[in-house]
Image (tube, rainbow, N blue to C red):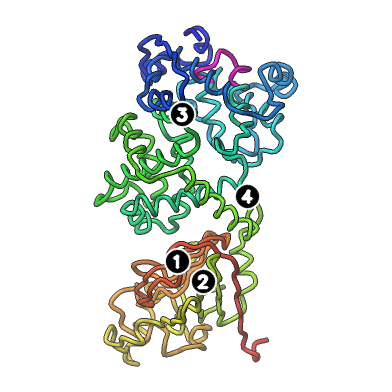
Amino acid sequence: MDSQGYNCFVDKDKMDTAIQDLGPKELSCTELQELKQLARQGYWAHSHALRGKVYQRLIRDIPCRTVTPDASVYSDIVGKIVGKHSSSTLPLPEFVDNTQVPSYCLNTRGEGAVRKILLCIANQFPDISFCPALPAVVALLLHYSIDEAECFEKACRILACNDPSKKLIDQSFLAFESSCMTFGDLVNKYCQAAHKLMVAVSEDVLQVYADWQRWLFGELPLSYFARVFDVFLVEGYKVLYRVALAILKFFHKVKAGQPLESDNVKQDIRIFVKDIAKTVSPEKLLEKAFAIRLFSRKEIQLLQMANEKALKQRGITVKQKSVSLSKRFYFQCEGHEPTLLLIKTTQKEVCGAYLSTDWSERNKFGGKLGFFGTGECFVFRLQPEVQRYEWVVIKHPELTKPVSLETSATSSRHCHSVSLSTSSSSDPADRLSPFLATRHFNLPSKTESMFMAGGSDCLIIGGGGGQALYIDGDLNRGRTGHCDTFNNQPLCSENFLIAAVEAWGFQDPDTC
């Protein structure tokens, strides 16, 4: 491939700035081990023509389905699919999940060509249901393809790989979700310091890890992504895990002990990856990735299989587009006071909470997440052993002093913003536990009165220094840890998948 081939899609000035072209080299080796070393060393990284030839060769050698769309198929269908639409306004296939198409060094023509190719792939691969990595792959391949048809053929061969030992790109929501869970398992094992930071600064660490493919397919600059892709085509899917773990290690090294740039660690990691050139070179990133020891393809396969099985047991095989399960939970629970929440994890652990106050109380915060409830709330564990954790003030009254009757009205007004409990005797919480409403106590801080909170994205039981229970809006995932309100130990595994949720409601017969 000469420079005239890809220049019709590429902004040459941007390309020269992003990746220096030092001219042609020859590649004569055929042995896999030698190819691995050359890919890791970046042998063809600074020769556009050679990289194009290597990609063509490596992708041509991918074992594929008997019938795999080629360049001639693209020529036959592109006109019918695109029609009279402007390529820049073409819609994206649903399976890319509203993913931004990275432009890298593509010009306007190249950006439109990516959309055309994606639509043609969707036409030829109706079984693909979820593949947010594909826009980045097609955009990269277009930099090193003579025309759209050749890029289409390369992408199709990657998607049509039928070698079970050489998994390449996730093409279903089940595969994507299980890969995110697998990445979380690997982080917990191989990046323990970074994992502790993620747990400390994020409300849902699993949601942070669910972003791992985006770091690679979209946020990484072209010069870095191309180097990763070089090795990926030779060695397969495990390379992606290695590089993502290395990114997290570098993020932890740079950010540990520093304030985060935003209140959203997912966004902070994305910013870090976009600006990764300020921190580490592509060579150092790959060096760190392959320095992780005792990391095997077999381990990834076993974790992936176990996580897919757990997801299937929960019935999570496609991305949910319906109303979140948390909203259904509130609908069923509102009007009942108190409620008993029971959770069974996929590891057969059982825990839960007794919640004193009607969940409808969450609505008084105007859509914002706020704590409410009374000191009657408590959390507990049933399996593997029974343990109950009640409000910390009950066991440690020295933490507070009762408020005198003369100052109760003042304390009520003062504590309303802190405890988020009741403000008048007509409130349901007062009927339940007038002496365990936090307005009757002088508390050293609000962390001792964070009983329950709920929004569309999550349910939280207990707060201050962590949450006793955090459950995501789809009631699929959760985490548990120590919190100041109940002074509890984790109620089950720190991060868990939910196998079943039950809520038992009680109602005053006089109000029925």
- As measured in the structure, the alpha-carbon distance from the residue carrying label 4 to the one carrying label 3 is 27 Å
Which is more N-terminal, label 1 or label 2? 2
Dominant SS type (magenta): helix
Comparing labels 4 and 1, the label whose residue is closer to the camera: 1
Q: Residue at x 52, y 63 (%)?
A: 455
Q: Residue at x 71, y 36 (%)?
A: 126
Give the structural element (helix, strand or loop) at label 1: loop
Tell me whether the residue at label 1 lies in contact with that at label 3, contact meaning CB atoms closer than 8 angstroms. Answer: no
- As measured in the structure, the alpha-carbon distance from the residue carrying label 4 to the one carrying label 1 is 25 Å
Residue that badge 3 annotates = 229
Q: Which mark is residue 493?
A: 1
Bounds of the magenta span? 142-151
Label 3 sits on what residue type? Phe
Tell me whether the residue at label 2 lies in contact with that at label 1, contact meaning CB atoms closer than 8 angstroms. Answer: yes
Residue that badge 4 annotates = 319
Q: Specify few, some or many for label 2: CA neighbours under 10 Å numbering under 14, 14-19, or 20 or more.
A: some
What is the x, y in percent for residue 161? 61, 32
